[in-house]
Image (cartoon, grey):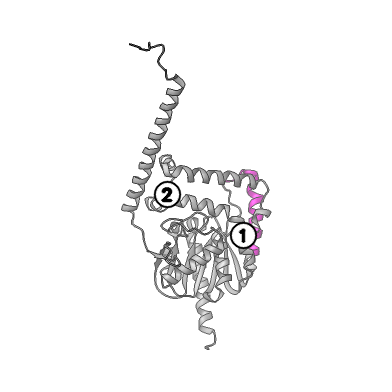
Amino acid sequence: MNQRTSAERPQHSWPRRIGLGLLAIVVFLAVAGFLYQNISEARDRRFNAMPGKRFNIGAEGASLYMHIDCMGQGTPTVVLDSGLGDSFISWQKVQPQIAKLTQVCSYDRAGIGYSDSSPRPRTSKVIAEELNALLQRAAISPPYILVGHSMGGYDVRVFAGLYRSEVAGVVLVDASHPQQENRLPIELSGMEGSWLREAEFLEFTMPFGIPRFLGLCEEDAWARAAECNFHTEREGVKEMKAFSESAAQAAASGSLGDLPLIVLSHDPDRSSADLPPNLVKPTNDAWEAMQEEMAHLSTQGSQIIARNSGHYIQVDRPDVVIDAVRKVVDQARASQTTSPKP
């Protein structure tokens, strides 16, 4: 009988065994994280029901359901557009109060929150076109008062340029300026790269539950149900990468003519935890100058400083946002009353 001795038999090297063991651990953790994320996401959404409705805006048989939540009654309808990567949740402190004045709708851009992802680029022009389709499908008739926060300011400016006859007024809430990438301190360019890498980290680790496990998701269960998911992080990264193109589209949209316009700006004397101390003043000074310029987009434009507020004025000083919307609604109604009958 021809038998090989133990010394002659092939041996698995220790490095290979260790490598296979580590691979098994990685696969186990990935599967466990995937299950943890999906079970937690389903639980959050089960116990924190989505407000509002979803409507299919897909063309030619395509399916693209977008989420919109409307409250109140009356005209003109106020439409709230959130900042980069943010869902409708960012307006939760102001929407119920505005609903006492007139109908008000917050929504999730495609891919954000409860809206399906869109195959189209995440530029402000596409976003404005999708918003217009959503309002039509939801049977929400113009005129509209458009309220845009941060990057949402690009969206509402482009919307007003595309559908001027449907817009009765605009409120810009610490909105982005088309030239800000060139006019803010040059040191911010490096920080923007870091912010993008952080967003990409959340995007690629979200399917495995790592941001949720590390406590990087929202503490509020309602906000976590809407935003702590892969597609929201992915679309936020896409919006960030399309930011320069959206800025150019906003600049090309031109002036707002004689539309009622209020520009709300954060407190220039307030420091920011996101910025080094030496960059706070030059950043705030440049931002304030650009905010003042945007007030001249309309012959009826004005600027209001929200004292003791950071970038999220609708969170820090919801009263200021509510009051600004009230003023623009009143102006729009007065204009409708005094306009000559055809």
> Residue at coordinates 48% horizontally, 43% vertically from top-left?
204
Q: Is residue 317 visible?
A: yes
Q: Which corner quadrant of the image does residue 178 belong to? A: bottom right
Q: Which corner quadrant of the image does residue 209 belong to? A: top left
Residue at image mark 1:
247
Residue at image mark 2:
229
Q: Which amino acid lies under the numbered mark 1 shown in the image of this protein? A: Ala
Q: Which corner quadrant of the image does residue 163 belong to? A: bottom right
Indicate the position of residue 299 as horizontal and vertical percent values.
63, 73
Badge 2: residue crowd in 10 Å (few <14, some 14–19, many ≥20): many
Quadrant the N terminus occupies: top left
Disc 2 is placed on an element classified as loop
Indicate the position of residue 128 as horizontal and vertical percent values.
53, 65
Classified by dominant secondary structure, the portion drawn in magenta counts as helix
* Figure check: 340 above or below 55: below
Disc 1 is placed on an element classified as helix
* Figure check: 96 above or below 216: below
**Is 307 placed left or right of 44 in the picture?**
right
**Is 326 placed left or right of 266 in the picture?**
left
* Figure check: 26 above or below 322: above
Question: Is residue 290 in the magenta section?
Answer: yes
Point out the stretch of residues depicted in magenta. 274-293
Indicate the position of residue 228 as horizontal and vertical percent values.
42, 49
Q: Which amino acid lies under the numbered mark 2 shown in the image of this protein? A: Asn
